[in-house]
Structures are given as structure tokens and as C-alpha cells.
Image: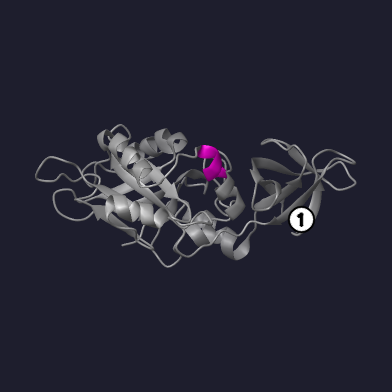
């Protein structure tokens, strides 16, 4: 079984959110598990309430019942296997019945999902909220150390992956964010917003493209505008920034006008502002789910 990365779109091809979908199995608990960014949850629930007939499926917010931990690093596989008894190289495995299941002794299960986002081995662990403290403690005893959101953001930006709520929002067309080959199956049936995506993919274009940015020692911030070198025209905007040990400088993601072909140089300020390198943001498509 494999997790599936995708998006939910409006009829105009704008994003409601991105998400990861897991098939949780057949039987009494048959259904799909959806991992959605917190900032996209309200829009997703509203979308389902509007377009999903309740006689076909029921939607339930499990945010207060199911939590998620991400374990990553060179030795993450050994730690995950020691604590959870498995470390799939790809796809995912259900733990004791899955995040919605329940064992005979009343203890709920979970799911272990292999990631393909960062540049190091990594797994998402879905568990009942009540079991999260014990899992955290066991992972620590096995050698894991808490690192915080900033480390995840750095790895994400290094790998060129946009995050919903930071690099993408309800105004984003997935083509702009480079999601077309990663989040869409062009051989499957119809979906809301398909006409817009197909038209752009085959006959059109978008004005903005997500790009990898290299700031050197310049102090860039999300929201900063990017200007053409030697001129005053705005050619882009910064959405994410991180200090990268891998590249030895400040890096980021942002949207740049289609006329600016990477590799290129823009500036943080008009005229002689700090130079910003513009490169392709090329996250892996196959196997990626976030």
C-alpha cells in the first residue's frame, strides 16, 4: 500500500488544500485517512459539507483523537523499527488495526508512513492522541531527540517542497507550485478543477512559478519582493526562508515571473540590492507524498 499525495481544487483550479491519503482497509472501519495541514482543515470540511453527499460517505475530524509524529535522520529507520516493529522503505503499514481500529484489549492502533520529502530517511507515525506521550517517551529511549519545526522546514526548503499555508494558499494554482506531475494522475477520471489544469498543461501557461532561492548572507524574509537586476520591476516574492547547513547560506522558496528563466539573478531591493540566485525547485515526483 502506498500513501497518495494530492490536492483538492475549486472549480476554478485554485487549491482548497493539499493532503496525503491513506487507505485504512475494508470492513467495519473501511475508509480513507486524510492528513491535512491545520490551516486547510476548515476549508476542507466546508468543501466536503458542500459537495459530498452524506449517503455516500461520512466525514469526521479526528484532530482531537489522532496525532502525528515525524521521525527523521540517518538512524531513524533503526529507531522506528525498534519502537514500532517496522520501518517500511516505501508506502505505509497499519499498526494493530490502523488509526481508526481497536484491538481486543481496547488499545487503538496506528499507521506508520514512509516519507519521500526530506533528504534523509523519515517516517510519519499516526497514533491515537492518548498514546502520543508514551510513543514520544519510547522514541526518546531508543535514541530519538526532539528537534522542532524549524529543522523540518529547513529540510523541506532544501528539498524544494512547498508547504500549504506558507508557500501555497487558496489563491494558488497547483501548476504554479510545481505540483502537476507530483499530485495529479492524468489517466484517472474527472475531478473538480480538471478543465483548468488540463488547459494549462496542454495549451496554456501560468505567470508565476515556484523557484528555489539562494540568498547568500542577505537577510531575506517571507513576503520580501524580488526585483530584476539593474531595474525596478518586481519579478517575484519570497515565501519561505531558512538557514541551510547543506548549502552553507540562507535559502528559500518563492514565486518568480515566468519570464525569468533559471538560473538567474534577482535582487532583494531595487537597484543595487543584495543578489538572489534563482534556481529550479525540483522535488522528486515518484514516491513523494508531501
- Residue tagged 1: 259
The spot of residue 254 in percent (x, y) is 66, 46
- Horizontally, residue 233 falls left or right of residue 222, namely right
Residue found at the far left of this picture: 104
Residue at 86% over, 39% down: 270
The spot of residue 158 in percent (x, y) is 61, 52
Give the camera-side residue of 70 and 231: 70
The spot of residue 200 in percent (x, y) is 59, 59
- Horizontally, residue 38 falls left or right of residue 177, namely left
Q: Which residues are magenta?
A: 149-153
Residue at 27% over, 43% down: 53
- Report the number of numbered marks: 1
Q: Per the image, is 58 magenta? A: no
Assign the magenta stretch its main secondary structure.
helix
Query: Which quarter of the rendering shows the N terminus?
Result: bottom left
Residue at 28% over, 51% down: 84
Give the camera-side residue of 199 and 178: 178
Residue found at the far bottom of this picture: 187
- Residue 207 in sight from this viewpoint: no
Quick one: label 1, few (<14), some, or many (20+) residues within 10 Å? few
- Horizontally, residue 42 falls left or right of residue 166, namely left
- Residue 76 in sight from this viewpoint: yes
Amino acid at each position: 500500500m502506498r500513501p497518495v499525495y494530492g490536492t483538492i481544487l475549486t472549480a476554478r483550479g485554485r487549491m482548497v488544500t493539499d493532503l496525503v491519503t491513506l487507505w485504512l482497509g475494508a470492513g467495519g472501519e473501511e475508509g480513507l485517512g486524510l492528513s491535512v495541514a491545520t490551516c486547510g482543515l476548515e476549508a476542507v470540511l466546508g468543501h466536503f459539507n458542500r459537495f459530498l453527499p452524506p449517503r455516500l460517505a461520512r466525514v469526521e475530524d479526528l484532530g482531537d483523537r489522532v496525532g502525528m509524529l515525524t521521525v527523521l535522520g540517518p538512524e531513524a529507520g533503526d529507531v522506528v523499527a525498534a519502537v514500532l516493529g517496522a520501518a517500511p522503505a516505501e508506502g505505509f503499514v497499519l499498526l494493530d488495526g490502523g488509526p481508526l481500529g481497536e484491538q481486543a484489549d481496547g488499545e487503538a492502533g496506528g499507521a506508520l508512513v514512509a516519507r519521500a520529502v526530506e533528504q534523509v530517511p523519515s517516517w510519519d507515525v499516526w497514533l491515537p492522541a492518548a498514546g502520543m506521550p508514551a510513543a514520544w517517551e519510547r522514541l526518546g529511549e531508543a535514541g530519538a531527540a526532539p528537534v522542532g519545526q524549524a529543522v523540518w522546514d529547513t529540510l523541506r526548503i532544501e528539498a524544494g517542497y512547498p508547504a500549504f499555508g506558507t508557500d501555497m494558499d487558496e489563491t494558488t494554482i497547483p501548476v504554479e507550485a510545481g505540483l502537476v506531475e507530483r499530485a495529479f494522475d492524468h489517466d484517472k477520471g474527472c475531478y473538480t478543477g480538471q478543465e483548468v489544469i488540463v488547459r494549462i498543461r496542454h495549451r496554456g501557461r501560468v505567470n508565476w512559478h515556484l523557484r528555489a532561492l539562494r540568498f547568500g548572507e542577505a537577510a531575506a524574509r517571507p513576503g520580501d519582493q524580488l526585483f530584476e537586476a539593474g531595474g525596478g520591476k518586481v519579478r517575484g516574492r519570497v515565501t519561505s526562508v531558512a538557514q541551510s547547513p547543506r548549502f552553507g547560506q540562507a535559502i528559500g522558496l518563492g514565486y518568480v515571473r515566468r519570464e525569468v528563466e533559471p538560473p538567474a539573478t534577482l535582487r532583494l531591493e531595487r537597484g543595487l540590492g543584495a543578489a538572489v540566485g534563482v534556481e529550479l525547485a525540483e522535488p522528486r515526483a515518484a514516491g513523494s507524498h508531501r
